[in-house]
Amino acid sequence: MGYSDVKFPAGSQFLVTGGAGFIGSNICEALLGMGYKVRCLDNFSTGKRENIAGFINNADFELIEGDIRDFDVCMQACEGVDYVSHQAAWGSVPRSIEMPLVYEEINIKGALNMMEAARQNKVKKFVYASSSSVYGDEPNLPKTEDRVGKVLSPYALTKKTNEEYARLYTKLYGLETVGLRYFNVFGRRQDPHGFYAAVIPKFVKALLNNEAPTINGDGKQSRDFTYVENVIEANLKAMASPSEAAGETYNIAYGGQVYLIDLYNKLCELLGKDIKPIFGPDRAGDIKHSNADISKAKRLLGYSPDYNAEKGLELAVNWYKENL
C-alpha cells in the first residue's frame, strides 16, 4: 500500500513544476524523503515560499524561479531530468470564467512548452495534472475515463486540451505521458486564503474564526474528496509505470462520494463547532455530482489509495489547527 515500494534508478533526477504549490510541494517532499534529487520550477504566482521552507536547504533540492510560459526556462528546467511531474497551472473554475486568456497562456501554452522541453531533453516519463472537470456535463456515475461530456469552463477546457496534446506527444514523438485526473484534492498546505480558495480550507478557516461559511447551492452536491497522500502515491507510481500505461489518463480519487453538507457537518464535529452555514447560489461551471471509478489506475499504475475522506479530513484539520 502507499508508495513505500516505489523505486527509481539510483541517481534519478526529478523535476516538479509548480513545486512550491500545494500538491507540488508535497511531491517534492516525498521524493526528497526517498533520497532522490529534486528540481522545483515555480514562479510563485500561486505557489508559496513557506511550502518549500522545510527543504529549501536540502542539498538534493534545487529551485528555479521561472515561468512555464517561457520556453527557454522550460528547457533549462528539463536539462538532465529523468522524470517530470507537471503540476504548474492555475486552478479554480470561477476564476477561469473571468480570465480565460490567462488560463490559455498558463495551462495550455505552458503545458505544451513543458512537453516539448521534456521531449527535447529525452525525459523518460512526463506525468501531468489533469482534472475531473473534463467530465463536464456527462451525467453518469461513477466517472469512467472513456466517457466525457461537454466541458463547462475554460479551466476544464485547458485540462482537456492538455490530455489531447499529451496523447499526441506519446503517439507522435514517443514521449511517455501519463495524465492524472484529480478529484477534489485536499490536505496539508492547501491555501485557505483568497476568494478562490478550495472548499475544505475555506470552511476550516471560517469555522476556526467562528464565522459561518457560505455553501454554494443546497449542499446536496457530491464530490470524491481525495486526500493529498493519495495524489503523491499516484504521481510516484505514474512516473514508475510501464510504457504500456503511457498516452493515457487516469482518475485519481479515493472512489467515494461525499455530500457537501455532510462534509461541512463532519468539519464542525472535528473542530468542535456548532455553526449553521449560509446557503448561496450555485456556482457557474460547477458539476453537481462527481465520483470516480479508479479501477483503471489500480490496474495499470498499481494505484492503491490508503486514505478515505474521513481519515484525510482528520489529518488535514490537525494540520490547519497548527498552521492557521
Image: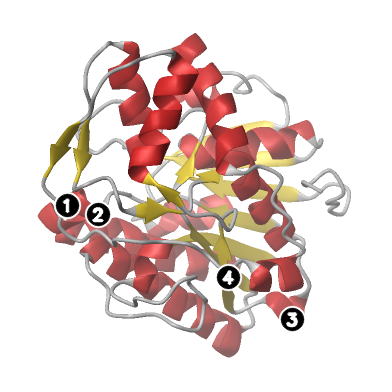
- At mark 2, the secondary structure is helix
* Marks 3, 1: nearer the viewer: 1
Which residue is label 2 attached to? 93
- Spatial distance from mark 3 to mark 2, Cα to Cα? 32 Å
Which residue is label 3 attached to? 244
Instruction: Identify the image quadrant of residue 9.
Output: bottom right
Residue 281 versus residue 115 in the image, above or below: above
Left or right, 52 with respect to 133, comes to right
Q: Amino acid at mark 2?
A: Val
Pointers 3 and 4 in contact (C-beta within 8 Å):
no
- At mark 1, the secondary structure is loop
Say whether disc 3 or disc 2 marks the residue closer to the N-terminus: 2
The residue lying at 21 percent from left, 22 percent from top is 212
Q: Which mark is residue 120?
A: 4
Q: Amino acid at mark 4?
A: Gln
Q: Badge 2: few (under 14), some or many (20 or more) residues near its Cα, within 10 Å?
A: some
Q: Residue furthest bottom?
A: 172
